[in-house]
Amino acid sequence: MNTVTKTARTAGALYLVYVVVQIVADVVGRSSTIIYGDAAATAANIAASAGMFKVGFVIDLIAAVLFLLTAWALYRLLKPVNPEVALLFLLLNATGVAVQCASDIFLVSSSWVLSGADFLKPYPADQLQALAMAFLYLYKNGFQIAQFFYGPWLFPLGYLVYKSGFLPKALGIVLMVHCCTWTATALQFFLLPGFTAITYVSWPLGFVAEVGLGLSLLFMGLWARQPRRAIVA
């Protein structure tokens, strides 16, 4: 197995593991616990499963690290195609990861204010619950801000997949289209919060694009040619 093939399979494995870990983080840490708009019910859920909530937070951080490592492996793989474009998608991904990790501070803070620590006892329970909900909204908004980097990173990535000569061109096109739908989903969240139609297109397309890329790298192997070198004028 040559170095390029090994890098491709590493990138594919990291991408697929990241997807699984991120789904686990969503299920374990948030989906059954947080009820946005209902501070009392959310506080009760967090108190009842405080340990799992914190585990979900840690898994979320692990997922972010895996995503960054995936981007680094893809950068190493696709840099010979065009180093400037490869650097662009790496920087977009790294910025998104940084914003996501920063938003996670608010996620764990919501659990912290509901911990029942002695120094929090002077504050009424309803105020602590409201503060925890405020932290969760800050987390949610921070996570959506990260999508303004996670969306655009797909376009240069898709472009390099299309130009690579050793990955399916159709997959590159799907990734570039997914860039538009995923970015539109983030815009929808802030500008049209009651409108969710774009999400029904973006999520299935994202599954096809990103899981498809991971599977292509991991199982399909590389096609006959090596990556094309960038042409410098």
Image: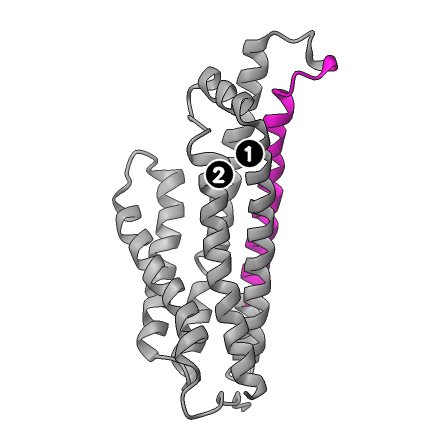
Percent x, y of residue 10: 54, 72
Q: Residue flagged by tag 2: what amino acid is it?
A: Val
The stretch drawn in magenta includes residue 159: no
Instruction: Name the residue at 53% across, 17% down.
Output: 130
Q: Nearer the viewer, residue 50 or 39?
A: 50
The local crowd at label 1, few if under 14, some if 14 to 19, many if 20 or more residues have their Cα within 10 Å, is: some
Percent x, y of residue 226: 48, 90
The local crowd at label 2, few if under 14, some if 14 to 19, many if 20 or more residues have their Cα within 10 Å, is: many
| Secondary structure type for disc 2 | helix
Instruction: Name the residue at 30% across, 33% down.
Output: 194
Image quarter where the N terminus lies is bottom right
Q: Which mark is residue 28?
A: 2
What's drawn in magenta, residue-wise? 90-119
> Marks 1 and 2: CB-CB under 8 Å?
yes
Q: Nearer the viewer, residue 60 or 174?
A: 60
Which residue matches tag 1?
A: 52
Q: Residue flagged by tag 1: what amino acid is it?
A: Met
Instruction: Name the residue at 47% across, 18% down.
Output: 39
- Above or below for 211 versus 21: below
